Amino acid sequence: MSLNSLLFFLFAVGAIATGIVMITRKNAVTSAVFLIAHFFCLSALYLSLQAQLLALLQILVYAGAIMVLVVFVIMLLNLGAEEKASETLNIRGLLGITVAGVLGVQLLAVFMARPSGHNELPPIATSNGTVEALGRALFTDYIFPFEAISLLLLAAIIGAVLLAKRHLEQVEAPKNISTDDISVQHQLSDKPVH
Amino acid sequence: MPELLLLILISLLKGGLVLGLVVLPGAVVSVYYERKVSAWIQHRIGPNRTGPFGILQPFADVAKLLLKEDIIPTDANKGFHFFAPLIAVTTAVAAFAVTPFGNYIMVGTTRIDLAVAPNINVALLYVFGVGSVAVYGITFAGWSSSNKFSLLGGLRSASQMISYELCMGLSVIGVIMMAGSLNLNDIVKNQADLKWNLFFQPLGFIVFFVAGFAETNRAPFDLPEAEPELVGGYHTEYSGMKFGMFFLAEYGHMVASAAMTTTLFLGGWQLPIPASVLAPIGLVEGSIVLGLLQFGTFFAKIAVMCFVFIWVRWSLPRFRYDQLMNLGWRVMMPLALVNIILTTIVMAFLR
């Protein structure tokens, strides 16, 4: 067995194990941590496929930015270990299991249909995953999707700012304050009250 | 595959050497350095009882921390409480894996690069990736202690680090454009003959350095552990060596940040003497003496940067939370963007 397949099995098993642990934990923070561990396993898998940039971006974007925000929100909401999902099987659960089963069978069918036995990378793969190669591809062959996604992200950012700002103005807008109230007057005028 | 085994063996050896000869002594020395410099700034003498000039003070500190009782709060989430300091130390140390300490030396016919993992195509991104994971150490420490002060400290730190990571990332884009590479050794080589990025990218340097303060959680950005309002911040509930690990992580981050600033803006291991002067006296690339000189130069530069870190900590007051956020989003980020645009324009005209 070559080193590559050894690393693949190590991290593939790791990825699956952390994935399973992540969906079975009841504590939201524990789940988040195992999701981060899962991202690290995925990153190692990308590295073993010579996709260096993708591996680093997986850590930088998912483990380092998105999951930080997720953990942040979980902590702000302060969901304790007591927060239990309903244990009983309901319609939603059944539906979920059915959809997951169908997806699983489809995936299995696709992988079974492919010829197996290729565990060596084509030689071009070693130079394909570098920053230079990916950048060149993005700015030549894939320039339209690249620009389209940039535009989409820009629109999303502007939308997020707009939504946040609108909410802010509503909160800050002066309400009907009776100016007779001496303490309010104090706050509004910002001068000492005698 | 003996070649691969040899490579792994050499890398492990280099990693051990860096850990044992650079990172740990670096942290120990900077503890002493900080005590002495702060004393000098405040017109005190500083430690002078433990050994000559108090140089054994860091060892006394470590002994004290090791002998203290390790207390875990009853309500704490034990696993997270245990792992948080480990994450903090690991991320502080991990950045040194790609830091070039020198160019290379030739021993016989074998070329030994003076870095644990030399010439990595995405080294700079790796440094940022490690830095972004460092948030978890502090966040989990704050959360797992089940203490409101700790939690607030952890949350503050998370938002602070997210905000400043952005500025940090944007501020180095000028450097990347000039070097045309994310490989740290290439970036250093691009700064040969005193053509340091500091002179070409002053704006980028300022933004990067200020963001470095925020990333290391040191004053004036040490809000996560602001004593008057948050007691000890995220490490309120830590004692003994676990607290010591946060302590070690803080100094590790400081040295790592100084190393990164040196590599990106101060010419890294480049000697301040042009190669055309060095070559005639036998100091050609690959000679062991030059390698050692480069190593020494790198550390002299790091020592200067660490001095600035300590200097700032003991002379500036702490920011208020809203001031910190305003500085990050309304001053630093636009400045970094301006730097990118200016660099692009200048480079386009010089081409």
Image (tube, coloured by chain):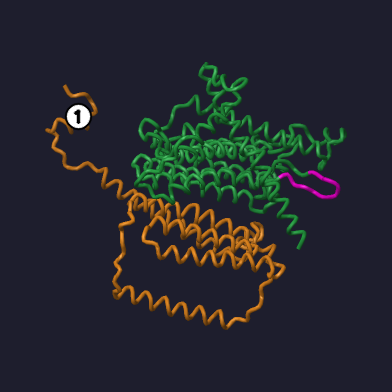
Q: Determine whether the residue tagged by mark 1 lies in a helix, strand or loop.
A: helix
**Residue B271 visible in the shown view:** yes
Question: Which x, y percent locates residue B267?
Answer: 69, 37
Image quadrant occupied by the N terminus of chain B? bottom right
Q: Is residue B140 left or right of residue B287?
A: left
Question: Which x, y percent locates residue B209?
Answer: 56, 36
**Residue B154 lies in the magenta stretch:** no
What residue sits right under mark 1 in the picture? A186
Rendered green, the chain in question is B
Chain at numbered mark 1: A
Q: Residue at x 64, y 57 (%)?
A: A131
Q: Residue at x 37, y 53 (%)?
A: A74
Q: Residue at x 57, y 44 (%)?
A: B340
Q: Which residues are magenta?
A: B105-114
Q: Nearer the viewer, residue B187 or B93?
A: B93
Q: Nearer the viewer, residue B263 or A181?
A: B263
Question: Which x, y percent locates residue A29?
Answer: 40, 55
> What amino acid does circle 1 point to?
His
The quadrant where residue A178 appears: top left
**Residue B106 lies in the magenta stretch:** yes
Q: Nearer the viewer, residue A179 or B27?
A: B27
Rendered orange, the chain in question is A
**Residue B351 visible in the shown view:** no
Q: Nearer the viewer, residue B122 or B98?
A: B98
